[in-house]
Amino acid sequence: MKSSLDEEVFFDKNGDTPASYDIMNWQLDMEGSNKFVKVGLFKNGKLFINESIIIWNGGQTQVPVSVCSESCTVGYRKASRQGQPACCFDCIQCSEGEVSNGTGMSDCIKCPEDQWPNSGREKCVTKTVEFLAYEDPLGSALTSGTAVLLLLNCFTCITFVKFRHTPVVRANNRKLSYILLFALTLCFLCALIFIGQPKNMTCILRQAMFGIIFTLCISCVLAKTIMVVIIFKATNPHSTLRNWLGYKLPSGIVFSGTLVQLVICIIWLVCFPPSLEHNMKTITGKILIECNDGSLFAFWCMLGYIGVLASVSLVVAFLARKLPNDFNEAKFICFSMLVFVSVWLSFIPAYLSTKGKYMVALEVFAILSSSAGLEICIFIPKCYIIIFRPDLNTRKATVNK
């Protein structure tokens, strides 16, 4: 139908006329007068606006914002400004362990325990797993060092077995030398248990095996040192010390010395067994796969007992260092014990101040260096005489000295 102005008028099904509006913008012209400018149209349910001709309050052509701060981006959260409206805020980066994955967030989201924020703190990623692996440069270096020392020890064993009837090998109890060489082989192999991803079984055994094997080594060294002193003192035909010559005394020293450590380790493993642990708190953003020793007191008791045996061996060897050349092994034992004690005294403060794979690597290095000290100081001089100075490896040369 048409209106009185001869305009067509439409009605919808409900009898209402479809809305049609002009969108007007009240603007202030250069002369200071107000005028209405048509900037858009609403017709047939659709809105059409020409934003380029709209003038906002203050003569601005840009659309004003309803807040006094820009919206915070991902990785940040809003923090209200004291004494200002709620629309005014600062953007603060999420704290460690938290992320925000959207804009304008008021609070950050805490990551699960096994995850950590990425560099932008916009999403959680899985934490890096760390342990002393064979593929790690540090693990590879320690493994290579172990292999070299094992080869050196095998060469020494072959040399001593081949020349077992010569005076140099027979001096100061040949059987003790064999036991000590066997124990040093176990020491070098023991270092490999600390390298690689820890397992429940390796965690239970590695510290106990280390303690027992090293105690066997130091007990052999102590027995050799005591035998040096007894042999020298027993040169007098009327000396009662001659009754102690033979294999019973050194065997008893080795057995009893190792037995005490064995008892300590058994009590440790039964009462406070070590276990596998995934440590997520020590180093930020990393999961340390490591062994929980179960009882620090038991660990330091085990290490302290080795220290006591080494100290006794050092004192006895030092007092016997000036014995005649027939029995000058005491000097080499003294040097080896100095190296051993120095390594482990340096190990303690360094061990307490390191974390993760570096703590394990430090213990492996202490095992290898102290074992190498025993090998080099006690056996290499004898191997030198056997191979390069056979003229000194005779009964006649020994008697002449």
Image (cartoon, rainbow, N blue to C red):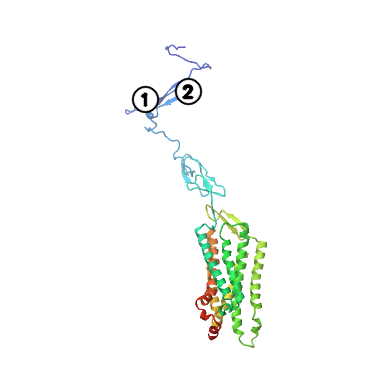
Judge whether residue 152 can be spotted in this image. yes
Quarter of the image for residue 202 reads bottom right
Q: Position of residue 206 (x, y in %)?
A: 60, 62
For the point 53% across and 46% down, which residue is it?
124
Q: Residues within 10 Å of mark 1 (few under 14, many from 20)?
A: few
Q: Amino acid at mark 1?
A: Lys
Judge whether residue 308 can be spotted in this image. no
Q: Position of residue 73 (x, y in %)?
A: 46, 42
Q: Position of residue 218 (x, y in %)?
A: 59, 72
Identify which residue, 377 or 387, lies in the foreground.
387
Identify the secondary structure beneath mark 1. strand
Using residue 70 as the reference point, say whether residue 154 is left or right of it: right
Residue 381, placed above or below residue 34: below
CB contact under 8 Å: marks 2 and 1: no
- The label nearer to you, 2 versus 1, is 2
Identify which residue, 101 or 69, lies in the foreground.
101
Residue furthest to the left: 31
Using residue 76 as the reference point, say whether residue 277 is left or right of it: right
For the point 53% across and 83% down, which residue is it?
397
Q: Which mark is residue 35?
A: 1
Q: Position of residue 138 (x, y in %)?
A: 50, 60
Residue 366, placed above or below residue 15: below
Q: Which mark is residue 164?
A: none
For the point 63% across and 58% down, which residue is it?
201
Q: Which mark is residue 45?
A: 2
Identify the secondary structure beneath mark 2. loop
Residue 395, placed above or below residue 276: below
Residue 323, placed above or below residue 66: below
Q: Residues within 10 Å of mark 2 (few under 14, many from 20)?
A: few
Using residue 332 as the reference point, say whether residue 65 is left or right of it: left
Q: Amino acid at mark 2?
A: Gly
